[in-house]
Image: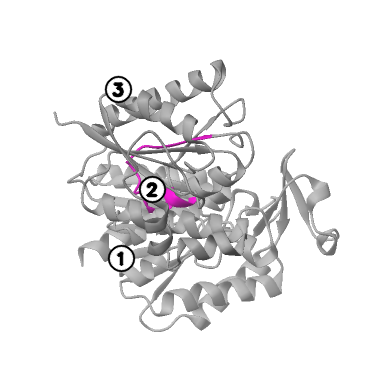
Amino acid sequence: MSQRKVIMLGSFDTKAADFEFLRSCLIELDLVVVTINTGVFPVQVPFQVDVEASKVAKTAGYELSSLRDQSDRSTALEIMGLGASKEIARLVSKGQVHGVIGMGGGGGTFMTLLAMQGVPIGIPKICLSTLAAKDLSRQVGTRDITLMTSVVDIAGLNRISRMQMKQAAGALAGMIQSSDLWAESDTASIAISMFGNTTECVEKCSALLREAGYEVLAFHAVGVGGQTMEALIREGYFDGVLDVTTTELADHLCGGICSAGPDRLKAAAEKGIPQVVVPGCLDMVNYGSPDTVPAKYKDRKLFSWAPDVTLMRTDQIENIQLGTTISERLNNSKGKVAILLPMGGISRISVEGGPFYDPAVDQILFETIKEKANDSIEVLEIDTHINEGHFATVAVEKLLSLINS
């Protein structure tokens, strides 16, 4: 087997000794190291720099001298991160990257995580960071990046930093060795969205799809789950989408903690992939503990799903907006689309007797969807609850018919 090639990126201007040691650890593991410098100041390092900082800046559309003259650290971090991302993507497109590693404090972590956005899922990525214990979900985004805490600051070698760097190098080598498991599959794949309140439906749908010979990838609709699903749809991973749980739309509308951003429910339509869409869990918006619910919603119907999760029942106006959003985003789809409406309830807690049971509000949602959907979209009313077996059967049969027609 030929030697595996890895990218080591970071600010060589301020952390030359640290990166020299990390590089030596990677080489000891028989890895070929390609170095990318994201530091903006002059540097002399005792190893070859394959992609100089000037090239990184130019790739992002800037001259390195202008970044130095501006003395704007925030702008420089973003520009160098974007430039590195493009440089890495270029190398990846040539099949020259088997892994990526970077390290740093606040600025170095930001640049590393931004640069890793250009690396597809399946290629190992490790960031050794002083911030690894913080919430970096926004910076990690939809990529499969492994964060490793540096324990001490990356500011000169010592017994702990040497150990951490050696372990990070070993972890990357081990992940690369195992990455042969990530291979192209001849099995067609289906993306499906799920939530605790639609688990029964998704489990039944998944079982039926697997029986039909499909690989099923489920995405937890907590914000990053929807974002990741949309990103992978755009990257061509799926042959169909069963979007059972579109609750992230409600969170985006009402400022909940599970928003997937403004592009949710757009990727499959743009790519022309067959999809079945369900307004699953649009009866709820997710907040944290009760004290985190915005003041304007304090008098609304609330339900404690867990100590750190408070659900708010969506109202009539919000359901008109949500129904309009669903239909408008699907109306211009390049592929075949069906919308399934579970008339008996759209979440586990909207069942009759449940805390969010409100068929009149659900009906407003359904009528809005039907009114706003164009003639190219098939809208089916299923006279059952979303988590009943019949609904799962209809959903799977409809998706397979769209794929095979």
Give above or below for 77 relative to 306: below
Given residues 122 and 71, the one toward you in this image is 71
Instruction: Please give the name of the residue rendered at 62% of the width and 26% of the height, measured from the top-left corner.
Output: 152
Residue 31 x %, y %: 27, 29
From the image, state whether disc 3 or disc 1 is nearer to you: 3
On the rendered image, what quadrant is the C terminus found in?
bottom left
The local secondary structure at tag 1 comes to: loop
From the image, state whether disc 2 or disc 1 is nearer to you: 1
Q: What stretch is highlighted in magenta?
A: 114-128
Q: Which residue is tagged 2?
A: 205
Q: Which of marks 3 and 1 is nearer the N terminus?
A: 3
The local secondary structure at tag 3 comes to: loop
What's the residue type where badge 1 is placed? Ile
Distance between the Cα atoms at labels 2 and 1? 18 Å
Residue 102 x %, y %: 45, 38
What's the residue type where badge 2 is placed? Cys
Q: Which of marks 2 and 3 is nearer the N terminus?
A: 3
Given residues 398 and 86, the one toward you in this image is 86
Instruction: Please give the name of the residue rendered at 61% of the width and 43% of the height, measured from the top-left corner.
Output: 106
On the rendered image, what quadrant is the N terminus found in?
top left
What's the residue type where badge 3 is placed? Leu
Is 122 inside the magenta-drawn segment?
yes
Instruction: Please give the name of the residue rendered at 32% of the width and 39% of the height, measured from the top-left corner.
Output: 48
The label shown at residue 273 is 1
Image check: 229 left or right of 402?
right
The label shown at residue 9 is none
The answer to whether the residues at label 2 and label 1 have Cβ atoms under 8 Å apart is: no
Is 238 inside the magenta-drawn segment?
no
Distance between the Cα atoms at labels 2 and 3? 44 Å
Q: Which residue is tagged 3?
A: 29
Instruction: Please give the name of the residue rendered at 29% of the width and 58% of the height, measured from the top-left corner.
Output: 236
Label 1 neighbourhood size at 10 Å, few (<14), some (14-19), many (20+)?
many
